Amino acid sequence: MFKPAAVLELAYRADSNSAAREGLWVRVPPAVPNVVDLRIACAASPPDPQRCARFDDLGATYAYLLGVYLGDGMVSAGRRDVWRLRITLDARYPGIIARTSDAIASIVGRPAGSTIRPGCLEVSSYWKHWICLFPQHGVGPKHERKISLAPWQVDIVHRAEPAFLAGLIHSDGCRCLNRVKGRLYPRYFFSNLSIDLRTLFVETCSSLGIETRQAGSRNIAVSQRESVATLDRLVGPKA
């Protein structure tokens, strides 16, 4: 293991110079290097934990981006070991596009790019450490493989459940009106082929006291009045 060498400093500038005369050089210990939070395993090539994301710096912004990524995002390898995050969003919701772009910029420290597609807009960003922040990356569609959160992701989601839930709904959910006996009632749907993602949605709702029910093979519905009111307060309609 590399051991930093001690350095020389004038005694009158050192901490312990009570017994030293001015002009005498003494040995002082080297500065302690910055401690890297190892909860996030740096998967960049080559690994660079000092430049990787820090767990303590990630919160609701990342929780929201994680929810959006799990629904509408992908990470692909580029040249020079740089990874590209791409999230495809409905062009009808500029608020969601802005929140996603702001989340990326906040984490990476530079603005996200965008590409106009038919009916949608692709928000993207190049960074060597996207592979570290989204270990769910893999070959094939998400619903065809196991999707689970890393322990450090679970900790972040538990600290920012409303933001994570908003990301899931903004990617694969909606708020609509259901007609019952001539009256209209609001309710939410989350729709995804992945049973793992539907489970994440249900578990997060349950933790926030939101009642859910299965509504078909791929849909989760929230229709109970108090639960809808909670989602209206935490998420609200897409915009």
Image: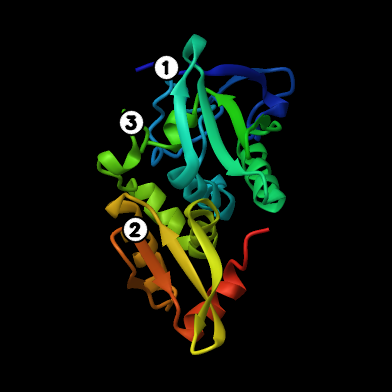
**Residue 88, located in which quarter of the rendered image?**
top right
The C terminus sits in image quarter: bottom right
The residue tagged 1 is 45
The N terminus sits in image quarter: top left
- Most extreme residue toward the front is 182
Distance between mark 3 and mark 1 Cα atoms? 17 Å
Identify residue type, mark 3. Answer: Gly
Identify residue type, mark 2. Answer: Arg
Left or right for 87, reference 39: right
**Residue visible at 48% across and 51% down in the picture:** 67
> Which comes sooner in the sequence, label 3 or label 1?
1
66 or 153: which is nearer to us?
Answer: 66
The residue tagged 2 is 198
Left or right for 81, reference 100: left
Identify residue type, mark 1. Answer: Ser
The residue tagged 3 is 138
| Residue 213 in the image: above or below residue 18 | below
> Which comes sooner in the sequence, label 3 or label 2?
3
**Residue visible at 57% across and 17% down in the picture:** 7
Camera-nearest label, 3 or 2: 2
The answer to whether marks 3 and 2 mark residues whose Cβ atoms lie closer than 8 Å is no
The x and y percentages for residue 162 are: 52, 65
> Which comes sooner in the sequence, label 1 or label 2?
1
The x and y percentages for residue 90 are: 61, 45
Label number found at residue 34: none
**Residue visible at 74% across and 23% down in the picture:** 22
**Residue visible at 70% across and 52% down in the picture:** 95
